Amino acid sequence: MNSFTARLSPAQAQTLQRLLQERGFDFSERPYTIFFAQKEKLSVAVYEKGPKVLVQGRGVEDFVKFELEPNVLGEARLGYEEVHSPEMFEPHFGVDESGKGDFFGPLVIAGVFVNRETARAFLDAGVQDSKRISSDARIRELAKEIRQRAAGRIDVVTIGPARYNQLYAKFGNLNKLLGWGHARVIENLLERVPDCPRSLSDQFADARVIENALLRHGRAIRIEQRTKAESDVAVAAASIMAREAFIDWLERKSRQLGVKLGRGVSAPIKEAAREIVEKHGPEMLEEIAKVHFRTAHEIAPEHFAPPAPRKEWR
């Protein structure tokens, strides 16, 4: 195990800080953290949001078992996931996506089937929500592990920017497009595991969007959506598979264009978009970017209309 995360109360965060000071950890400032401490190859970060602790590096398992659990959490969690979250070990699909908030690149939706055996194997391998993993190399390492363990019960749908822009114009709403993509992944997984009883994903829309799409093709499965669904190991595995496909696409297209296509909608992203428009014309953005983003209008206002005012999702 090379990482562990858990929610803390404010009092537990203070207790952990004192414990780390007593154990000789070195403290330094990091963005969005209450504190960050490191000793040798082990780091402990407590993030403001939550608060939440993330333990990474060498010796994670020993630190969690012999320091964090008995002295801070007051309960044993590591190795007891089946007690705290028994539903995570029941057969189900986890579905997640990558790229929906990034100007460049596709929208990728992935699904992974787990049962008791694969859920435990994923946890032991360190599978967690891809948003907690900053290293692309680590994403690819875990994706390889997931492919080996899931035995083909994985599906990845990559909606390239050109097709994405067509579908967005058709649906007029990202949530409907996501629902369509989730339904495609679940339908494909049901071809391989027809008796799977349920699917789990993050809360993003009315579940009936997915259910109706599936029923049109004669498919029936219980659709579950909830906030923080990425804490489920199947959803976490799906997030890693989607992220791998997304970063692979960005790398391939960056090599073809000779311009680095990064993630997000930052100033460097806009500079890259301007360079592409200068080299290849504004039409190229339709092939590599989500042109309903305001960024497209900012870069090429004569070619792309400003986005419509956002409507509240109901």
Image (cartoon, helix red, strand yellow):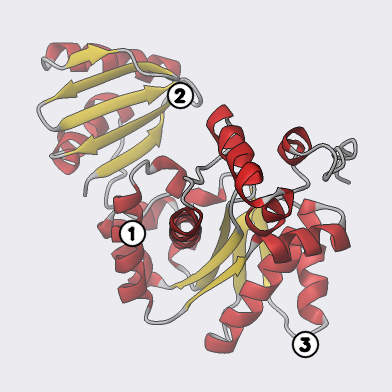
In front of the other: 286 or 226: 286
Q: Position of residue 15 (x, y in %)?
A: 30, 15
Q: Would residue 67 be seen by someone viewing this image from the given angle?
A: no
* Residue ID at (18%, 11%): 21
Question: What SS does tag 2 mark?
Answer: loop
What residue did someone put label 2 on? 51
Question: What SS does tag 1 mark?
Answer: helix
Circle 3: residue type: Gly
What residue did someone put label 1 on? 140
Circle 1: residue type: Arg
Q: Give how far apart the Cα atoms at labels 2 and 3 are.
A: 44 Å
- Mark 3 against mark 1, which lies toward the viewer? 1
User: Mark 3 packing: few (<14 Cα in 10 Å), some, or many (20+)?
Assistant: few
Residue 218's label in the rendered image is 3
Give the side of residue 192 with respect to residue 182, left or right: left
Q: Position of residue 251 (x, y in %)?
A: 43, 55
N-terminal-most mark, 2 or 1: 2
Marks 2 and 3 close (CB-CB < 8 Å): no
Q: Position of residue 224 (x, y in %)?
A: 66, 61
Q: Quadrant of residue 270?
A: top right
Question: What SS does tag 3 mark?
Answer: loop
